[in-house]
Image (cartoon, rainbow, N blue to C red):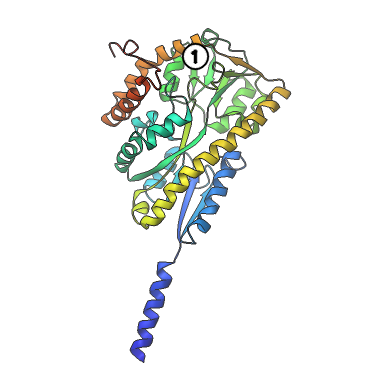
Amino acid sequence: MAVGAALCGTLLMGAGQAHAATTWKIQSVWDAGTVGYDLFEEWCDSIEEKSGGELIFKAYPAKSVAADNNALFEAVRNGVLQGMNPFTLYWSGKIPASVFLSSYPAGPDQPHQWDTMFYSLGMLEKTREIYKKYGLFYVGPIQHDANIIHSKKPVNSLADMKGLKMRVPGGMVAEVFQEFGVATVSLPGSDIFPALEKGTIDAADYVGPAVNYELGFSQVTDYIMFGPPGVMSIYQPVDLMDLTVNLRAWNNLDPKLQALVEEQVRSFSQTHYLTIQKRNIEAMEKFKADGNQVTRLSQKDMEEFRRTAIPIWYNWANKDDDAKAIFEMQLDYMMNDTVGYIDEEDIKGM
């Protein structure tokens, strides 16, 4: 009886351990109170029920655990946080290939093109191979939106950008704009509104209309620069976010939970994207009501922008073998007749 009681206790303890929840702390780069963070927090909260109580995602807004992007990267690598929800482009200084893991000037500009490259053409597997070197696991891309430019002055052509002092992301985006005479400035998102308000910059890139309206950009600018009809942005038209987690935490997760997380990231990507598109439509009406005007570049401007960007693509692709491998996948895709963005003549001598 004593042996049987001991065995029963052991089995019960084992069963309890098997069902103990794993909790991951995941910090987003979205500020609290934005539509992006609200969606992310809601999604994180849903994981406990979807996993039958075995996995809990605890969401944190920007700067709440890790104070800046560099600290965020290291916090996930070191296991202080188990995951992060960043804009993938943020790691261009650490992982040069990351400039090709989200849209770049005049590159693939439709959300379905990025999903095709990740999930059908081998880019997801290659990305995971790259991130593994940093102790990270790239779960998958999360569709976000196009990035757009708000300006105090109208920009109706590439020539109109000359002399503007503009906040843009660093790296490839800044280099292309500099070719058109723009004085580029790097500022965190929280510093954009006061810089525009004080007039220390003339224009600023940030995310899409929905979030930018929430941040008050209509109060400090008069114009919104889009590309040709159907193109919101010629420089970052598909600004991808992602879910990246600590590699050790990922490997310790039960395979069925790994499969659930991957499936949920793909599902959340669509929810996130479509919700923001709806909010964008509503926000543009608010911008117009506040007196903001949309200006558009022409198709000719778009073609000139791409010609200028191509050598800069190659400069970044040559930073290391990983960047080269990702870029070659995309180059083949852009040259395929199903896309047809560039041809042999465009890259002659590159």
Asked whether residue 81 appears in the rendered view, the answer is no
* Quarter of the rendering containing residue 315: top left
Q: Name above or below for residue 209 compared with residue 42.
A: above
Q: Where the N terminus falls, by quadrant?
A: bottom left
Horizontal and vertical percent position of residue 160:
55, 9
- Locate residue 66 relative to residue 198 in the image: left or right: left
Amino acid carrying mark 1 in the image: Val
Q: Which residue is at 49% across, 46% downward?
A: 27
Q: Nearer the viewer, residue 170 or 342?
A: 342
Residue drawn at x 39%, y 81% is 9
Q: Is residue 219 left or right of residue 74?
A: right
- Is residue 347 left or right of 267 when viewed as pictured? left
Depth order, front residue of 265/174: 265
Q: In the image, residue 30 lies at what x, y percent?
A: 54, 39
Q: Badge 1 local density, few (<14 within 10 Å), some, or many (20+)?
A: many
Answer with the quarter of the image where residue 71 lies: top left
Q: Residue at x 29, y 14 (%)?
A: 350
Question: Residue beneath label 1, please?
Answer: 182
* Quarter location, residue 212: top right
In this rendering, the answer to whether 128 lies above or below 345 is: below
